[in-house]
Image: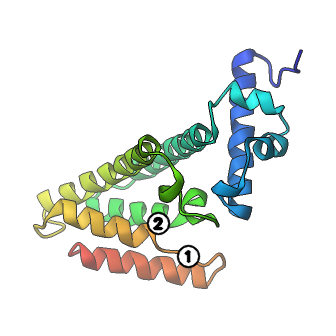
Amino acid sequence: MPKIIGGSLREHREQTRHRLFAALSTLMSERGFDAISFADIAAAAGVGRTAVYNHFADKEALLIGFIAHETEQYMQTLNRALTDAETPLVQLQTYVRAQLGLKRVFHLAPGTDLRTILSRPSQQRLRDHVVAVEALLTSIITAGVEDGTFPGQDIPTTVSLVSSCLSGKQIPERDPERGIAIKATEDFVLRAVGA
């Protein structure tokens, strides 16, 4: 019988999932999703290969689970940060800094672009996570337009453009370059929405 990690079966399942997510993240940063096998992930996570199947039906399901977990954690952190931001302008600045600080291992990994190798349903599930983050940006910009902080504008187009700007931006790892890049991007986004 396999050894239980943690104090309960629920804890064991949660810790095993976290190990699998960490292993997937590390492996993807090294060689890309398409070059990783379930056996590689299990070995890196320190669990038996058959144990992976107790949590995920296949590699795509594991990736979607990982991205869902990462998005949920990110949204919780971002929402906490936004509770202290009293105005749409400060909320947008907070959003930009959070997006630039987000580690997108599943977007920036070496290897084939995930959109070209995932099934249609998995591609849609990936898109659903982007939609959740963009909905938050939509609410910030809408509030800013409504209170006069930002001029009237086509909000869906603005959201799309801001999201594209932030998702494609690679920020240097070290200061002062990092701080300079974040400030320049923040200023650019604020000008783009008319602040």
State whether residue 126 appears in this view.
yes
State whether residue 144 appears in this view.
no
Q: Which residue is mark 2?
A: 97
Kindly identify the residue that appears in the image at 41 percent across and 66 percent down.
96
Mark 2 residue crowding within 10 angstroms, few (<14) / some (14–19) / many (20+): some
Instruction: Give 165 or 144, whichever is nearer the viewer.
Output: 165
Instruction: Give 112 or 81, whichever is nearer the viewer.
Output: 112
Instruction: Give 89 or 102, whichever is nearer the viewer.
Output: 102
Q: Is residue 181 above or below residue 30?
A: below
**Position of 155 compared to 114: left or right?**
left
Mark 1 residue crowding within 10 angstroms, few (<14) / some (14–19) / many (20+): some
- Which mark identifies residue 171? 1
At label 1, the amino acid type is Ile
**Position of 125 compared to 43: left or right?**
left
Percent across and percent down for residue 29 are: 69, 62
> Mark 1 and mark 2: span between their CA atoms?
11 Å
- Which mark identifies residue 132? none
Q: Is residue 18 above or below residue 129?
A: above
Instruction: Give 139 or 28, whichever is nearer the viewer.
Output: 28
SS at badge 1: loop
Percent across and percent down for residue 53 are: 70, 28
Percent across and percent down for residue 99 are: 46, 62
Q: Dividing the image into 4 quarters, which one contains the C terminus?
A: bottom left
Kindly identify the residue that appears in the image at 34 percent across and 80 percent down.
188
Q: Dividing the image into 4 quarters, which one contains the N terminus?
A: top right
At label 2, the amino acid type is Arg
Kindly identify the residue that appears in the image at 69 percent across and 19 percent down.
10
